[in-house]
Image (cartoon, grey):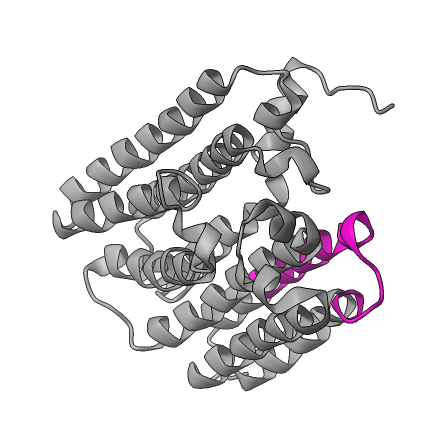
Amino acid sequence: MTEAPGPIRRWVLAARPRTLPAAMVPVVVGVALVRPRTINWGNSALCLAVALALQVGTNYANDYSDGIRGTDEVRVGPFRLTASKLVPASTVRSAAFAAFFVAGAAGLLLASRTSWWLVAIGATAIAAGWFYTGGPRPYGYYGFGELFVFIYFGIVATVGTAYVQHLTIPSRSWWLGVATGFMACALLEANNLRDVEGDASSGKKTLAARMNRVRAPWLFAACVLGVLVGMAGAGHSVVGIVAILLYVPAIRLAFSQKNGRELLPMLKYSARAQLQLGALLAVVLVFRVGV
């Protein structure tokens, strides 16, 4: 029997560190779109705080909602607070609300420095984070999770971060938002592909669960191809090709005969590819390399 994680480690694990690149990379890309000497570091830091707090809040909210529904009873993925019964469900819910509060507070400060229209966008992002698996009809249970991560951890995060630098939107930010959005979707598919059997048996109809273990790998491959399309649209086709290569280990595992816990490394491979791509793209953008 596996020993339960300690009081601090259990919260760190439930925050799901390997999903955090989905929050960090689009912010880094958005910042790198402007010339280094003109970066607004204060606004950039606030964007990062919003993105990370929103990601952690969504993870805790997902932990709470799936836990009280019993969805995680057959889960093979990373540690969960609520399902483990090591932490009261109400405490996990409060942690989610606290993270969303931090995201909202940072967002309000950012809006006061830039545009109040950001308040409306931030409010929808927080609502989307909660209702992903929360509420009476969670949209994540009906196959719309990819839409959420694509919009908020791709388009909104990338374009929004670029906008708050000088209150203008670089044209390339839209295509790069597409690229980072598909990176986030690939991360989600790595998670959902692993949980296909458990989600299907518990009534959680993610796109991967609807497609089943045989066809779902093509959804992951389509997300990786979407990264290439976004990069090419932004004029960085070489980086897009590198993206395909970086995702090869995850793609090979997706199309293997492995199931359940055997697919756990997919999340690690996908997160690593996203971080490496974010770093490469930042260097390319900062030094204005035409690749």
Q: Nearer the viewer, residue 106 or 227?
A: 227
Relative to 7, is 93 above or below? below
In screen coordinates, is 21 left or right of 132? right
Relative to 88, is 119 above or below? below
How many marks the image carries: the answer is 0
Name the outermost residue toward the right: 1
Q: Which residues are magenta?
A: 252-278
Main SS category, magenta section: helix
Which corner quadrant of the image does residue 31 belong to? bottom left
The quadrant of the image that shows the N terminus is top right
Which corner quadrant of the image does residue 16 belong to? top right
Magenta stretch encompasses residue 258? yes
The quadrant of the image that shows the C terminus is bottom right
Kindly identify the residue that appears in the image at 25 percent across and 55 percent down. Answer: 164
Kindly identify the residue that appears in the image at 52 percent across and 59 percent down. Answer: 184
* Percent x, y of residue 80: 62, 30
Name the outermost residue toward the left: 116
Magenta stretch encompasses residue 55? no
* Percent x, y of residue 57: 43, 35
In screen coordinates, is 208 left or right of 235? right
Q: Is residue 36 visible?
A: no
In screen coordinates, is 160 left or right of 176? left
Q: Is residue 80 visible?
A: yes
Q: Nearer the viewer, residue 246 or 284?
A: 246
* Percent x, y of residue 187: 59, 57
* Percent x, y of residue 11: 59, 24
Kindly identify the residue that appears in the image at 47 percent across and 70 percent down. Answer: 285
Relative to 4, is 220 above or below? below
Q: Nearer the viewer, residue 70 or 83?
A: 70
In screen coordinates, is 95 left or right of 213? left
Q: Nearer the viewer, residue 185 or 22?
A: 185
